[in-house]
Image: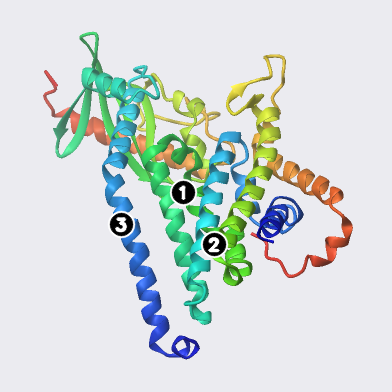
Amino acid sequence: MANKKVKKIFTLGLWQDNPIYRQILGICSALAVTNLMLNSLVMGIGLIFVTSFSELTVSILRNYTPKHIRMMVQVLIISSFVIIVDIVLKAYYPSMSKALGPYVGLIITNCIIMGRCESYAQNNKPLYSFLDGIASGAGYAIILLIIAFFRELLGFGSIFGIQVLGEWFTKWTIMVMAPGAFFMLGIVIWIARSLLPSEEEDSLKGEAVS
Amino acid sequence: MKNIKKSFSYPIIFMILVTAFFTLVLSLLNYTTKDVIAQNAQIDEWKTLLYVFDVDYPNDNDKKIEELYKEHLKPFKVDDITIYGAEKDGKKLGYAFPVEGNGLWGTIKGYAAVDENLNTLLGVDFVSHSETPGLGGRIDEMWFKDQFRNIDLDRDNKNYLEYRPAADGNVDAITGATLTSKSVKNLLNQDIEEFKDLMKGEDLNGK
């Protein structure tokens, strides 16, 4: 039973209900940091950390939190974890902190975290909520890495900063700029949606875009 | 439990407790990492100073950067402004001074270096700014900063820097970031002028 539930959490988060191409959440940062794979990886890890621990905390406190102030409590919890990520990056990974710049602080505005806290952690046990956070965060991170892979490869001719395409390759500068992000994101959503069974279309109702 | 949660004071006490807990955790974390962050900022500043004098440094070797900084640069004060004198192989390179001004979204801070006779701009680098990433934020990119090397400051008018294609242009602006580019030009022109005035009456021998 427990195993089944865990499996379901991960298939939903990673594939069937992936935050980016199913729920269209977290688009802002998906467009912003995907010009390099390393940035996307660190952003993804940061988001996995923040989402999972926020969901865990929200879930632990869910029976004690008065309903009408739950949003305030969630924002407080999420922002605390975001600040932790920010401080840790600044202290032990300053170059990455500089590269990501304002986007670390902007993790807090990522709809995935608040969305999962509100829809999942509020009604589920701490352990499952924690796993759900990891699954959703990983679903986000994987899509970011896929987009970043193509953008970095075509835009810089490199993967994780290692040059793989030689001098002969004409760099597609547009891929590392904003339009490239929109093209890639559109293509990824298109492919993912055409691979998914269409009967699930009905479940898409009342979603926010960030 | 249900009744307590509906009471007036429970939500307030609950909120205070949760806030106090997270504030405590964050301040502890902040306290323990304060020194490391300060150290990182210091190294960043040294890198900036080495860069404006075009001294090569290894990017990830903090010890070497500190050595190079101590070997080449010497801070001194003129009217409460910290200025860095630089030497290389016993030869005087020039002076670096802090520059600061309004960008599009916030204050741009950095350093500029001029040669000994205050006639040539040696280099410019920015320590902090809050310009739009990808647009104005590109003032951090090498191609932009490298343009400010060896620019003649011996001009009649006070526009030391001018963007091409103006007749006396000597650097390129950033496409799509006109306002940031303008701010950078203005703050540099103004601060170079002020620095020249500041140094006029100073006896710089041995500094």
Q: Secondary structure at mark 1?
A: loop
Same-chain check, marks 3 and 1: yes
Please tell me whether mark 3 or mark 2 is closer to you in this view: 2
State which mark lies toward you, 3 or 1.
3
Residue A55, disc:
2
Quarter the N terminus of chain A occupies: bottom right
Please give the label number shown on residue B104.
1
| Image side of residue A100 versus residue B33, left or right | right
What amino acid does circle 2 point to? Glu
Residue at image point 68% right, 34% down: A149
Given the image, on which type of amino acid does mark 3 rest? Ser
Give the Cα separation between the discs numbered 2 and 1: 38 Å
| Chain letter of the residue beneath label 3 in the structure image | B
| Residue A184 locus on image (x, y percent) | 74, 41
Residue at image location 47% in from the left, 25% down from the top: B170
Give the vertical position of B63 relative to A30 (above or below): above
- CB of mark 3 within 8 Å of CB of mark 2? no
| Nearer-N-terminus badge (3/1) | 3
Quote the CA–CA distance across marks 3 and 1: 32 Å
- The residue at 77%/44% (across/down) is A188
Q: Amino acid at mark 1?
A: Leu
Query: How far is the residue under mark 3 from the one under mark 2?
Result: 22 Å
Q: Nearer the viewer, mark 2 or mark 1?
A: 2
Look at the numbered disc 2 and give the secondary structure of its residue.
Answer: helix
User: Is B105 left, or right, of A170 in this rendering?
Assistant: left
